[in-house]
Image: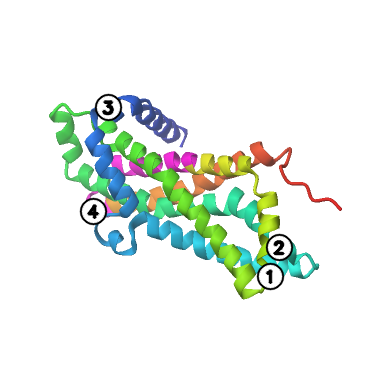
């Protein structure tokens, strides 16, 4: 197990180290992959690609936050703080985690299948024979495309969760828009938003790195590619949750940007 973990870490470090050179040498490939990451390829394009999946997921998760948050607060007579729930939980935890999981289920799984198919068909070996370094060309370019697409993608995801929670509070429960907006803007700290984006960028590197690793080292024909996709999805989701826990613990575990006092 430790040997496998060390091999993976070495793979990730090498892929990240190639980023500066890959931007220059493989610009066209990065641009092609950027479009694929954002809008999808094949059947994924029908639902709007990764953009559509992430926005829908965060929207309905934000709806659930609004429903549960309002009802829980209303039991103790503090439903006016629903805006605080959105600004606090959507920003810090809900939206980043949902975006990371959606990235694994869409882009990550696709990358594993692509690289796995190339490996079992000996296309990766063919690149090496032609003098093309397969690691930066196949893996680093995908990491760069994921990072480039991540920021605008997450802007839409975060806004979607905010809109959903606000809509539930105002249009479903009938809360005053002024009350909701007051507490939302009061507790929406710019630093929390920046850390939220930092989390998603970190998740992007982790998810794409893990999926590319399993696809790059796939074996056993088409069945082996399917096994690689399953392992990659499981590993990426677990890794995202572990990293999220430690980042939240480090940033907000000992202090907080929110203070509610009478």
**N-terminal-most mark, 3 or 2:** 3
Q: Provide residue 124's location: percent of width, then percent of height.
A: 20, 37
Viewer can see residue 219: no
* Nearest to the observer: residue 123 or residue 52: 52
Q: Which residues are magenta?
A: 201-224
Q: Which mark is residue 24?
A: 3
Residue 92 lies in magenta, yes or no? no
Residue bearing mark 4: 222
**N-terminal-most mark, 1 or 4:** 1
Nearer the camera: disc 1 or disc 4: 1
Q: Provide residue 60's location: percent of width, then percent of height.
A: 51, 65
Residue at image coords 43%, 31%: 9
Residue bearing mark 2: 179
Q: Is residue 220 left or right of residue 258?
A: left
**N-terminal-most mark, 2 or 4:** 2
Which is the main secondary structure of the residues drawn in magenta? helix
């Amino acid at each position: 197990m430790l040997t496998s973990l060390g091999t993976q870490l070495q793979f990730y470090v090498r892929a990240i180290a190639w980023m500066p050179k890959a931007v220059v040498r493989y610009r066209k490939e990065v641009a092609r992959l950027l479009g694929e990451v954002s809008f999808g390829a094949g059947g994924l394009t029908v639902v709007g690609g990764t953009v559509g999946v992430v926005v829908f997921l965060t929207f309905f998760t934000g709806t659930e936050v609004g429903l549960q948050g309002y009802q829980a607060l209303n039991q103790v007579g503090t439903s006016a703080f629903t805006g605080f729930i959105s600004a606090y939980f959507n920003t810090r935890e809900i939206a980043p985690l949902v975006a990371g999981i959606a990235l694994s289920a869409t882009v990550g799984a696709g990358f594993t299948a692509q690289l796995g198919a190339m490996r079992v068909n000996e296309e990766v070996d063919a690149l090496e024979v032609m003098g093309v370094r397969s690691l930066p060309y196949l893996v680093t370019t995908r990491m760069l495309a994921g990072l480039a697409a991540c920021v605008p993608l997450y802007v839409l995801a975060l806004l979607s969760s905010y809109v959903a929670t606000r809509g539930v509070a105002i249009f479903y429960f009938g809360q005053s828009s002024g009350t909701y907006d007051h507490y939302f803007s009061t507790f929406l700290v710019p630093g929390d938003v920046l850390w939220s984006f930092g989390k998603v960028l970190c998740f992007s590197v982790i998810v794409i790195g893990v999926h590319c690793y399993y696809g790059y080292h796939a074996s056993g024909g088409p069945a082996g590619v399917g096994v690689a996709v399953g392992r990659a999805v499981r590993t990426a989701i677990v890794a995202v949750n572990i990293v999220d826990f430690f980042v939240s613990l480090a940033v907000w575990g000992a202090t907080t940007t929110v203070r509610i006092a009478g």
